[in-house]
Amino acid sequence: MLGVPKERPTHAEQPPLVLLRDITKSFPGVLANDHVNFEVRPGEIHALLGENGAGKTTLMNILYGLYRPDSGEIYIRGEKVQIRSPRDAIQLGIGMVHQHFKLVLPHTVAENVALGLNGTPFWAPAKVVAQKLRELSTRYGLHVDPERRVWELSAGEQQRVEILKALIRGAEVLILDEPTSVLTPQETAELFKVLRRMKEEGHGIIFISHKLDEVLEIADRITVMRRGKVVGTLLAQEADKATLARMMVGREVVFRLSKTTCNPGEAALRVEDLYVRSDRGLWALKGISFAVCRGEILGVAGIAGNGQRELVEALAGLRRVERGRILILGKEVNGRSARAISDLGVAHIPEERIRMGIVPGLPVEENLILKKHHRPPFCWRGFLRFLAIREFAKRAIEEYGIITPSPKTPAKLLSGGNIQRLILARELSGRPAVVIAAHPTYGLDVGATEQIRQILLRQRDEGAAVLLVSEDLEEIMELADRIAVIFRGEIMGIVPAAEATLEEIGLMMAGEKRVKVEG
């Protein structure tokens, strides 16, 4: 039914909004959920944590009707229910905001919300929805213009649209999957205000995130899963990062990485007045210039879609440069192939690790030598030398901690963290002069994140010039020696990491140019 939800009181005596009891779900060879119990109470923000592959997403997909459990029971407001599809979930008052938004970019906000919404008139449904959106926007502080087209909105505004879509459908329980991964610090603060307001009105919110600081700030209770089971549930006020990380990965995790003083050498990578077009033929990069020296990490911060992908592809030889120059170790590489740039000593850790980083059907050992398969010791007179390949693979698997049943296991069967370790092992063998790392820890758990950050710092200390592109500001602030902020294809400023503040970086990410831009 179309309309603004009524305010509801919150009482401790009320039954849980959601109760999952003894949920079990298996896939071929994997027990994803092993007798899991989980509940969400009215007026509560309940965080769900776990490593990649711990079973969080499977559990939420069961609650939202995308999967059916093999066994177990689901109770909504004290009544046992069967959830066979997302439509059933929505009718039961469950909404989900996915990590990647499900919006039609050319349509307006009102048109997106009207799609599939019961109770809208046949003629001009968007006009009716627009009025309801304005009421909800005012009530929850989710300010967004119903008449604007989605492609014109920032990531934070698009997220508000997704939340409004769930609220206008009467959602009492809201599942948020990595909700801050594409937001500026200011947008994250605004989101948290909205969530607290919803909590005050009696909504139950499930908050899935790898960012432990945010979980401790926003959550009331925290449930940790590991290998398909619930390890424990505790009050946020009684938890800390070390405890949560230990519960997630089963060991101590180092949060403060040891970082030596930066002593930069010569510029190994130099970009001069670079212009590059997007896939749509528009300017993705507009005259950007910077340099990365040996022995330093230059972090590139910015919200997704501001030219980062095009920059990385241009540097790696995967996208044409329209104007400007790219120099590696003093040599101009405009127009050179990806192989030629790799042979100059450039390591490329791509954003899309499965589509761009591996050949999924090939075994781990062959993926490890993809860039060197045509050179000794892996090739002799045009034939692969499998003994040399196997020996190299065994050493790489041990050195980088790649968890795989065998070097012959197809790479597609590895977890996200182990695929990333495989890519790092391949790219960083041979001491590269330049490392281009695009979102190297995106979507990974705290254990894998810790290891990969240490590997990048080790490359810097060994004299590589590291360009780190990341939307994770905590990662940028922790690893980078200097920080460049990109907005709509332009550099807003380059600042020493020791002098940078989250507020200043956040403002530049939103388009406010720094008075002085360093090179």
Image (cartoon, grey):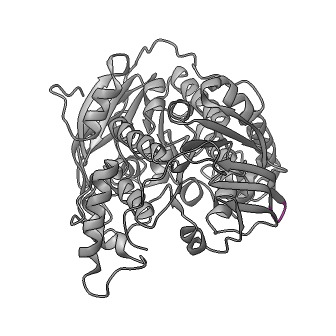
Q: Position of residue 360 (x, y in %)?
A: 67, 61
Q: Main structural element of the magenta stretch: helix, strand or loop?
A: strand
User: Is residue 27 located in the magenta-colored stretch of the structure?
Assistant: yes
The answer to whether 284 appears left or right of 372 in the picture is: left
Q: Can you see residue 106? A: no
Picture quarter containing residue 165? bottom left
Q: Can you see residue 366? A: yes
**In terms of depth relative to the viewer, which is nearer, 380 or 68?**
68
The magenta-colored residue range is 25-29
User: What residue is rendered at 41% in x and 60% in y?
Assistant: 162
User: What residue is rendered at 55% in x and 30% in y?
Assistant: 216
User: What residue is rendered at 35% in x and 52% in y?
Assistant: 155
Total numbered badges shown on the rendered structure? 0
User: Is residue 173 located in the magenta-colored stretch of the structure?
Assistant: no
Residue 362, compared with residue 250, is above or below; it is below
Picture quarter containing residue 148? bottom left
Q: Position of residue 68 (x, y in %)?
A: 73, 69
Picture quarter containing residue 71? bottom right
Residue 65, compared with residue 59, is above or below; it is below
Q: Position of residue 396 (x, y in %)?
A: 73, 39
User: What residue is rendered at 53% in x and 34% in y?
Assistant: 432
Q: Position of residue 499 (x, y in %)?
A: 32, 17
Which residue ends up furthest to the top in the rendered image? 261
The answer to whether 24 appears left or right of 223 in the picture is: right
The quarter in which the N terminus is drawn is bottom left
Which residue ends up furthest to the left in the rendered image? 515
**In terms of depth relative to the viewer, which is nearer, 380 or 329?**
329
The quarter in which the C terminus is drawn is top left
